[in-house]
Image (tube, rainbow, N blue to C red):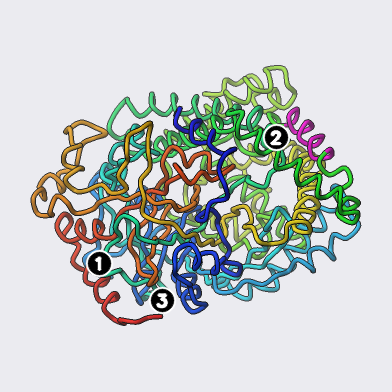
Amino acid sequence: MERVLLAVGLLVALPAAADEGMWTYDAFPTETVAKTHGFTPTQAWLDKVRLGSVRLAGGCSASFVSPDGLVMTNHHCVRSCIEDLSSPKDDLLAKGFLAKTAAQERRCPKVEANQLVKMTDVTARMNAATQGLTGAAFNTALKKEMAAVESACATSTDVRCDVVTLYNGGKYHLYEYRRFQDVRLVFAPEFSMAAFGGDPDNFNFPRFGYDVSFLRVWKDDAPAKSPDYLRWAKQGAKEGDLVFVSGHPGGTERKATVAELEFQRDVNLPYTLLHLSELRGRLREYASVNPERYRTTRNRLRAVENGLKALRGRHQALADPALLAQKRQDEAALRAKVDANPQAKAATAGAWEETAKALETYRRMLPEYRMKEAGDAYPSELFSIARHLVRLADEQPKANAERLREYTEAQLPTLRQNLLRGAPITLELDELLLSFGLTRLRETLGADDPFVVAVLGREAPEALARSLVRGTKLGDAKTRQALLDGGKVAVEASKDPMLLFARKVDAEARAARKRYEDTVEAVLKRNGERIAKAHLAVYGTAGYPDATFTLRLNPGVVKGWDENGRAVSPLTTFGGAYARHTDKDPFKLPATWVKAQGKVPPQTPLDLATTNDIIGGNSGSPMVDRDGNVVGLVFDGNLHSLGGRYAYVPETHRAVAVHGDGILAALEHVYGARRVLDELRAARDHDENPY
């Protein structure tokens, strides 16, 4: 991880990078791209790539790759679906999956796909609703207006509408999506191949992973039509080629104040890293007992390990004095320009100071908030179901604008799908997780804390977790359906122990949430908006907004980098994968790949690295060439990219993708996935000149 620090240390001396930026589609810098790369994307090109891009509501990206609803994404983006469809006798995570007919495609219980069809600027409406307000009143008015706009937009369950915040509140846009809730698994490789190299190779390069899966969206029990799909490139990407990534980066803090970055470095990240480290230890110990525990734990353990590595990279980036020095310099320059502009100065008076004060308040509040409301004390799937049932029963009778954001009408279709899913819940694992959370609750707040005393009473965390998990009936979808249909009366009448527990802790959790929203969130949002508007006033809108899990487009080139005097090639090959095979985890190729050795020319590209500016959430993003055709599938970044949360360093920041040629070669020669392969090739050959 030392390499992250070295990369960030270059920041002070670097000019603005041509490939930097996660750009919204309505403000893509076509002139800059034309000047830098000699290619000018037309509006038709932008529209086609936008409509070919897909968001998976759980936090990943994807793309349509045929006219019949075929969707490409990463294996790790649908791993929970594959796990849900597995059983002790049919371990699809271990052996992979291939639907040879449409009838064999299996529905993912918790996956929702969204296609962005319309973007509308609603900044004026949000500003009018919050004009003259501060603190809790500002926050409440903003959320009410967002709920009203979203509710008016979401005319059916096939439409999803989100008011998104851009430029830290400088602008607000309404994003309207076409929603697909019937999403079915078509193809997935073995877990061991999708995650080949395991944690040692994670965020590293060279890489040899085949992190690929295919889904299909269905409508009215038939494959949905997707005329705006991305065709496969006939020529694969090579070093120096211009490529674009279209996806949904989850979040960046490149426009954050210095106080916010220091809070992340000193408070939030250390707390989270400790929490995840302890959880990883518990999961490893639990999974080591027998194969069935390993089967039901490996997905969660992989996610925890990935999170740990990513957050360590962020923390080390913020710990590098060079980054904060550059951020202080940038903030000082902004404030100097604001002070020179009387109108901007008046509009931001006290904004930076109020932000710092709110963060100091949050420093003291964070453990209580994280435990009581954010869920650290009860990381149990069954508890999550119980909390949603309790809160939905309380929130739904309220006017839409008065509800908690996650229970507004616009959010209910996704919530209902998740509550009524037929996916299995591993009770033994859920018990372990709840026991871990309750133990952390007592350790964090103290055994004498009134809330801890009320929650645990005279019970040990392990015993309470056991009684709740083993006593609840919420693992049964029919029970959940009955409670949903019965509403508040049914929920309050229920004697289910997990529901009773969720009701027991809810008042304190809501109180902690209100304290956070009124004294921290409201101040940060309001002052973030004030600073953002001042930034826009003095610098204009030439820059890109921080990532917010909204669709973005970014240019880059296939390019390696220099690692301490060693040139890193941007391409890896099938031959390299076989050379890396040790027959021992995590460098053990699955039997399908061992058997296929020699069928694919060893020089065939498998993975590639590019200069594209990406972050978490871009997983599953299509990588396209200047014709808008697929040449790769983003699945990771290198170690240097972890500091990309706060800054982009062109010399070393790299996106990592599965090469388009490698995807096809493995489908054909390793997996014999003729149905998927033929569909991709037919879609590719359907129209020679789509733009």
Q: Amino acid at mark 1?
A: Val
- Name the residue: 86% across, 47% down: 339
Could you tell which of marks 2 and 1 lies nearer the N-terminus? Answer: 2
Which label is found at residue 676? 1
Q: Position of residue 221 (x, y in %)?
A: 38, 74
Q: Which mark is residue 386?
A: none
Q: Is residue 468 visible?
A: no
- Tell me where residue 98 appears, x and y as whole percent: 24, 59
334 sits to left or right of 375: right
Q: Position of residue 54 (x, y in %)?
A: 46, 65
Asked if the stretch drawn in magenta spans residue 356, the answer is yes
Task: Please identify the dominant SS of the magenta region.
Answer: helix
Dot 2 surroundings within 10 Å: few (below 14), some, or many (20 or more)? many
- Is the N terminus in the top left, top right, bottom left or bottom right quadrant? top left
Q: Are marks 2 and 1 in contact (CB under 8 Å)?
A: no
Bounds of the magenta span? 353-365
| Residue that label 3 marks | 226
Give the quadrant of residue 364: top right
Classify residue 374 as left or right of residue 520: left
CA separation, marks 3 and 2? 43 Å
